[in-house]
Image (cartoon, grey):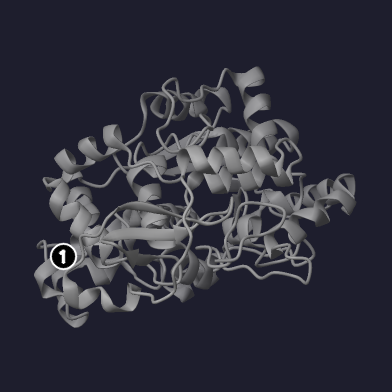
Amino acid sequence: MKFCSRCMYPSMAATPLTFDDKGVCSGCRVAGQKKVIDWKGRFQMLKKLTDEYRAKNNYDILIPVSGGKDSYYQAHIASKELGLKVLLVTYHGNNYLPEGEYNLARMRELFDCDHIVVKPGVDVLIKMNRIGFKLQGDMNWHNHCGIFTVPIQEAVRHKVPLMMWGEHGFMDMGGMYSYSDFVEFTAKTRLEHGLRGYDWHDFTDEGLEKLGRSELKEGLRPKDLLWAQYPPDEEIASVGVRGIYLSNYLDWDGTKNAELVTKLYGWRAAQQPFERTYRSFSNLDDMHENGIHDYLKFVKFGYGRASDHASKDIRAGVMTREKGIEMVRKYDHVKPRRDLERWLKYVNMTEEEFDAICDTFRDPRAWRIEGGQWVKDDIWGGSSAYGPVHLKCPQRAKFMREENYGRTKK
């Protein structure tokens, strides 16, 4: 496995990236563009753009928010710096941390905004957790779907043409686009990047039948998933809905966002450390995001949230690559006991069943089997074993290698 010579990302990252002749990934190259951009000029562009959408008798702008540090920063810029009439919209997936609930509940008052919060039924969400995990190795798929659907539904319903997102994940992490592209939100972004090619109908009994996965049926019907249904093109076009990313207009830095909103608004980070990363100010809207959800990424691709966070901090110039490797070595492989036990109880599943299903999503580009153990290459050199194999024998063939790799301790 090849790793970026500047950050922590492997060549087969979940957000696709490429390497130049110096071994630097596309994510690092695009992040480097930020140093030469005229950010004062970009902010003037933002002011001009938003001025065109000021409404006489309606909201000026809609902001999708989770209540996180970046949500506060977006609301601060829109309401305090630009003086816009803001509509906040939240998809609530039922697993907020207490600090996340506290932050979310205060936004309506702090920013003097109307705030729509959509909370699907808990039984439906539990079923979505189970189906998503078994179908594509992502129990948190419902969150991606809700976050990238509910705000567009509300924009159409309330006839608010301008939405403002924070950062574009695939651009920020993998460098999929340039800052010169001024990329905006699209239905293609939602389906291919956010939802990985699946849509709400794939989770109904009828959809699972069509996918040839009838054993996963949970009794979900289209009317159970109204919150997940993307508006038709003609309805979006009739309002003229567009979604801009604030990171194209301001020098976006998650760490600085957290510092600013903590100082101005008393925003709270997680009080209890996460098991799989060193940061405490990210993903407070879902207690499993930094736990089980991220552990599944390690199972699939061989890296985790500590790699994501260290890469961001290296690009921002607040962490060395050596310190990043130290964080990856400490956190990326951890099986989150506290989070796993909570989630298994939530969905009524045994750990044996969980481990067996996890192994079916391992990627042979990252993983190989040696001596009954899962083994992968490490960013600090050599390779290490990361636990026993739970796959059935017929499924193991593609992971068997003849090469004899030297291992180091993780």
The residue located at (74%, 42%) in the rendering is 316
- Residue 271 drawn at (x, y percent): 44, 20
178 to 41, vertically: above or below? below
Residue 77 visible in the picture: yes
Please identify the quarter of the rendering in which residue 113 is found.
top right
Please identify the quarter of the rendering in which residue 179 is found.
bottom right
Residue in the foreground of this view, choosing between 280 and 227: 280
Residue in the foreground of this view, choosing between 177 and 358: 358
216 to 157, vertically: above or below? below
The residue located at (65%, 37%) in the rendering is 323
Query: Is 20 on the left-hand or right-hand side of 138?
Result: right
Please identify the quarter of the rendering in which residue 100 is found.
top left
The residue located at (80%, 54%) in the rendering is 32
Query: Is 395 on the left-hand or right-hand side of 89?
Result: left
- Residue 139 drawn at (x, y percent): 29, 54
303 to 14, vertically: above or below? above
* Three-letter amino acid code at the position of disc 1: Arg
Please count the marks in the image. Answer: 1
Residue in the foreground of this view, choosing between 122 and 401: 401
- Residue 320 drawn at (x, y percent): 72, 39
Dot 1 lies on which element?
A: loop
Q: Quadrant of the N terminus?
A: bottom right
**Residue annotated with mark 1:** 221
- Residue 193 drawn at (x, y percent): 49, 66
Packing grade of label 1 (10 A; few <14, some 14-19, many >=20) is some
Residue 362 visible in the picture: no
The residue located at (12%, 47%) in the rendering is 350
Residue in the foreground of this view, choosing between 336 and 56: 336
Query: Is 267 on the left-hand or right-hand side of 37?
Result: left
